[in-house]
Amino acid sequence: MAISRKRIGILTGGGDCPGLNAVIRAVVKTAHNDYGMEVIGFKDGYEGLIENRYMHIGIKDVSGLLSRGGTILGTSNRADPFNFPVLQGDEYVHLDRSSQAVLNFESMGLDALICIGGDGTMNATAGMEKKGLPVIGVPKTIDNDLVGTDVTFGFDSAVVSATEAIDKIHTTAQSHHRVMIVEVMGRNAGWIALHSGIAGGGDIILMPEIPYDINCVCEKIRDRSAQGKNFSIVIVGEGAKPIGGDMVVARIVENSPDKIRLGGMSHQLASQIEGITNIECRVTILGHLLRGGAPSAFDRILATRFGVEAVHMVAREEFGKLVVLKNNELSQISIQAVSGKQRLVGCDDPIIKTALSLGICLGHPENMSLEDYCSSIPTSSKIKFE
């Protein structure tokens, strides 16, 4: 019979998103109410574990957290314990500090570590499990690109924010007879673009998984004009690209495990559309707006369910697992099975079929099935994730 654990560590890694504090709250309340466990929060993700920066989190500390965005623990998307940036002189060098993280974990007498994060955090967590740490993962990302779970918390809140912005863009588009391009986050995955595009009544949705044909995009805009619809709304994922083209890189962050920062492809698209159609375009890049603010009701509930279940898994000593949602039921998947993988939008996804039935242009010819179009795209244009 498993013995109830007494001391849990918790950290939030990667980019922030709505719902992180809701998980922390659920972990602390469940640990205290059901098991009498103590919770130690590491500051700024794995950086806090490596540098031994932490705080004790009690019931009073989580009061009011359910609706609060961000994370009271802070976070970092540069704190990979196996590739940790250390400033030496005027330059950063990357060192393996995983053994120091293990040493700090053991010296504090911790019995488990709950890691809340996306694919980068889970990759690091999978490595820490191999070094012997009793870890449990909680899936977080607005991008919704973690494998094994139907949805991650933070995604719904991002879609709600994007949809509200698209709703407001509509009135300006109608008033000025323009093509309005709204760029959303998502990296290699088009989930936010697809869902917010449908929810916001977009006419064209461009995603990283389906390289677009600019002529098809412009044909859709012209067709709408011919029908008396003198404006168009285009929703673009930041990682979208034309056939044979590249993603637009906003900048390179050298001391980060994930150096590439996408953003700004909508300006490239606007230039292409104006050059072909002679119709004026305007661009709105939502950017980090999608990661901020209070979590939606859906994300508050999902994050709470994840946090409660993570503590129960600690009590049952079910380590090395990621708590996931499958068919609205909580389940588990090995963190090793998640590491190094990414969940992308498939051409046969039901929500894709919904978009096509609505007449939404996805950047491909209307007289060609999406499956045939995707099959015809050169391999070099398709997203690869190793």
Image (tube, helix red, strand yellow):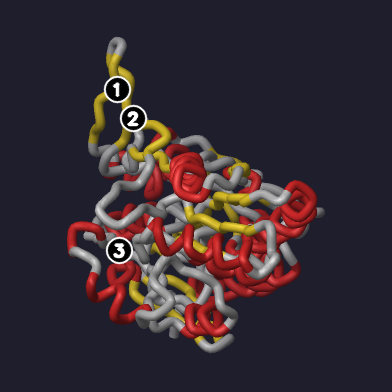
Disc 1 marks a residue whose amino acid type is: Tyr
Q: Which residue is found at the position 67% from the left and 65% from the top?
A: 26
Mark closest to the chain's N terminus, 1 or 3: 1
Q: Residues within 10 Å of mark 1 (few under 14, many from 20)?
A: some
Question: At 37% from the left edge and 53% from the top edge, which residue is drawn?
Answer: 241
**Nearer the observer, 346 or 83:** 346
Mark-to-mark CA distance, 3 and 2: 21 Å
Q: Name the side, left or right, on which 214 lies relative to 295.
A: left
Farthest left residue?
379
**Tag 1–tag 3 contact (CB < 8 Å):** no
Element type where label 1 sits in the image: strand
In percent of width and height, residue 286 lies at 62, 46
Label 3 sits on what residue type? Ser
Q: Which mark sits nearer the N-terminus, 3 or 2?
A: 2
Image coords of residue 319 (percent x, y): 39, 71
Q: Is residue 363 placed above or below 96 in the rendered structure? A: below
Residue carrying label 1 = 92
Q: Residue at x 28, y 17 (%)?
A: 91
Give the class, few, some or many, for how many residues have Cα within 10 Å of label 3's Cα (few <14, many ≥20): many
Q: Which mark is residue 255?
A: 2
Tag 2: residue type? Asn
Q: Residue at x 76, y 55 (%)?
A: 174
What secondary structure is found at the residue carrying circle 2? loop
